[in-house]
């Protein structure tokens, strides 16, 4: 990174474009430049080509986003609706985390820019006009494009508002006016206003007098539920995410030798490279859990040894450029072959997953796939003597949840823009609902035997197995979107041998 992100303090009006546009761009305290000469300011204002883009085609999701906005409008007649994208967050000092726009905003617009806001203004008793507040291109007249640390020469070119209107199919205004304009509008009329909270503190503060926390929470629930059924474009993005994820797992298997020589970090980096080449990023922190680390459900430290003879639990997903993510897990024998006990545990989890996937179909309860998988695992735990078959039968084990000592988590979740998509949706339309075509969910049973678990034989301790796939509910059943990766133990071994 260059030494000075914000290079200067432009203090005199001449250097900042004259009396009409006075603005200060505060430099770093210990920066090497303390002022801007009039001559340099004049030089930087001239000699630049016109780079405005014309006749841009709308982004692929624009018509689908318009349909989603229409459903939103129908649900809230007569109300003003505010959906922020969110702001940059500081990582340390003057460096920020990579920006990831709020899923609610992305779903309704197809845009991913920071500080943006979608606003729906009611047109009467029904209907809305939608518009965006966005950051325009950084100003060349007042020096913003090179003096400000977020100017064009420092962080790259933004689309102009006119360009964004062509791409997104929505009118756009300068977001720096949003808080004042929305606050003035809200105070000047009796229109109820809702906002998606947690993304833009400035907007929330500006509208605080007219907001209702309970109504805002319900608004977030609705927008989460709006994503439960994926349209054809979204399904295409999830297919692409799964295809790239298959490639990432293949890369990891090919480089297991380097991981053995280094650590789990090699695995993490190998998969991340694929995610960045074929998509935007990983959709969540990759779990690269070798040996006993596989018994920790969300092991993301990824700093342990990778040892032949043990298992690698790799839970990872590529996020597409449009922010839809896969979520796939495979448990792999690091030296390419399962031993007898590893295979027994693995095959039990495979059978549980098969039962779960078979239960995914239209009209089934969302909970059915979980119940089917858990039943298989409970049966195996009883058969192995890890649960007392003289005291409990399968029904009693499931009633009491005794299998959870070694299974721990639910068997799956919705998938889409978020890895745990639709998490804030209404319970009655999610976990208590029936499956319908277009829903996408994971099926991911697992068995985990902790190193310090004295209730199981010693040879079980430190073994963790999970198998996870991304399942689309279709009109006549389901489709495994991540079927490009083998699942049966013998197929996993053959696949790994082919890549050695």
Image: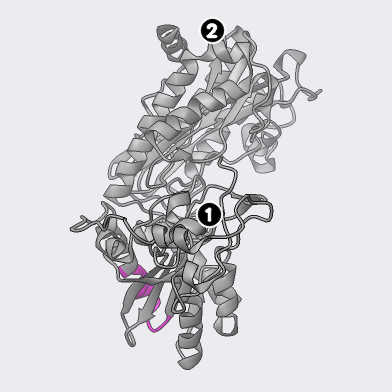
- Residue 499, image x and y in percent? 42, 10
Q: Which residue is nearer to you in this view: 18 or 371? A: 18
Kindly identify the residue that appears in the image at 42 percent across and 40 percent down. 280
Asked which secondary structure carries label 2, the reply is loop
Are circles 1 and 2 on residues that touch, CB within 8 Å? no
Q: Is residue 468 left or right of residue 62?
A: right
Question: Where does the magenta region start and end?
Answer: 70-79
Of the 4 image quadrants, the one containing the N terminus is: top right
Does the magenta segment cover residue 76?
Answer: yes
**Is the magenta region chiefly helix, strand or loop?**
helix
Kindly identify the residue that appears in the image at 38 percent across and 31 percent down. 244
Evaluate whether residue 104 shows in this view: no
271, above or below 177, in the image: above
Q: Residue furthest front?
A: 39
**Residue assigned mark 1:** 423
On residue 337, the disc is: 2
- Residue 221, image x and y in percent? 50, 64
**Crowding at label 1, few (<14), some or many (≥20) Cα neighbours within 10 Å?**
some
348, above or below 16, in the image: above
Q: Which residue is nearer to you in this view: 109 or 471? A: 109
Does the magenta segment cover residue 362?
Answer: no
The CA span between labels 1 and 2 is 38 Å
Quadrant in which residue 24 is drawn: bottom right
Kindly identify the residue that appears in the image at 33 percent across and 62 percent down. 160
Q: Is residue 324 left or right of residue 48?
A: right
Asked which secondary structure carries label 1, the reply is loop
Of the 4 image quadrants, the one containing the C terminus is: top left
- Residue 315, image x and y in percent? 54, 30
């Amino acid at each position: 990174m260059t030494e000075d992100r914000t290079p200067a303090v432009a203090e005199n009006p001449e250097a900042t474009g004259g009396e009409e546009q006075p603005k200060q761009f505060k430099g770093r305290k210990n920066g090497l430049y303390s002022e801007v000469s009039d001559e340099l300011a004049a030089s930087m204002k001239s000699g630049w080509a016109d780079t405005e883009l014309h006749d841009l085609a709308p982004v692929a999701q624009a018509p689908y986003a318009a349909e989603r906005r229409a459903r939103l409008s129908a649900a809230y007649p007569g109300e003003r609706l505010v959906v922020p994208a969110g702001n940059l967050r500081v990582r340390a000092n003057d460096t920020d985390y990579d920006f990831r726009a709020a899923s609610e905003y992305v779903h309704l617009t197809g845009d991913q820019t920071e500080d943006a806001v979608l606003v729906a203004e009611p047109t009467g008793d029904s209907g809305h006009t939608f518009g965006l507040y966005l950051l325009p291109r950084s100003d060349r007249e007042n020096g913003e494009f090179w003096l400000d640390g977020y100017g064009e020469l420092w962080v790259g070119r933004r689309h102009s508002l006119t360009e964004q209107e062509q791409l997104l199919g929505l009118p756009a205004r300068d977001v720096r006016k949003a808080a004042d304009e929305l606050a003035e509008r809200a105070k000047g009329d009796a229109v109820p206003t809702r906002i998606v909270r947690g993304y833009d503190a400035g907007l929330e503060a500006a509208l605080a007098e007219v907001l209702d926390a309970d109504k805002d929470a319900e608004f977030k629930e609705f927008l989460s539920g709006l994503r439960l059924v994926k349209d054809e474009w979204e399904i295409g993005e999830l297919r692409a995410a799964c295809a790239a994820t298959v490639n990432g797992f293949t890369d990891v298997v090919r480089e297991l030798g380097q991981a053995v020589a280094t650590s789990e970090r090699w695995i993490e980096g190998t998969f991340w490279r694929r995610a960045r080449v074929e998509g935007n990023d990983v959709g969540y922190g990759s779990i690269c859990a070798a040996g006993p680390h596989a018994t920790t459900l969300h092991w993301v430290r990824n700093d342990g040894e990778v040892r032949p003879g043990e298992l690698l639990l790799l839970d990872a997903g590529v996020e597409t450029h449009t922010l839809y993510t896969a979520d796939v897990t495979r448990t792999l024998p690091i030296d390419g072959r399962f031993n007898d006990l590893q295979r027994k545990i693995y095959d039990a989890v495979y059978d549980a997953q098969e039962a779960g996937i078979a239960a995914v179909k239209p009209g089934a309860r969302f909970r059915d796939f979980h119940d089917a998988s858990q039943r298989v695992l409970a049966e195996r735990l009883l058969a192995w003597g890890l649960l007392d078959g003289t005291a409990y039968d399968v029904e009693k084990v499931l009633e009491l949840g005794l299998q959870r000592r070694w299974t721990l988590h639910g068997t799956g979740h919705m998938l889409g823009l978020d890895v745990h998509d639709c998490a804030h949706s209404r319970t009655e339309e999610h976990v208590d609902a029936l499956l319908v075509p277009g829903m996408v969910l994971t099926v991911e049973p697992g068995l985990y035997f902790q190193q310090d678990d004295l209730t199981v034989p010693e040879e079980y301790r430190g073994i963790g197995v999970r198998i996870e796939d991304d399942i689309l509910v279709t009109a006549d059943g389901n489709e495994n979107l991540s079927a490009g990766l083998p699942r049966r133990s013998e197929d996993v071994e053959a696949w790994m041998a082919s890549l050695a």
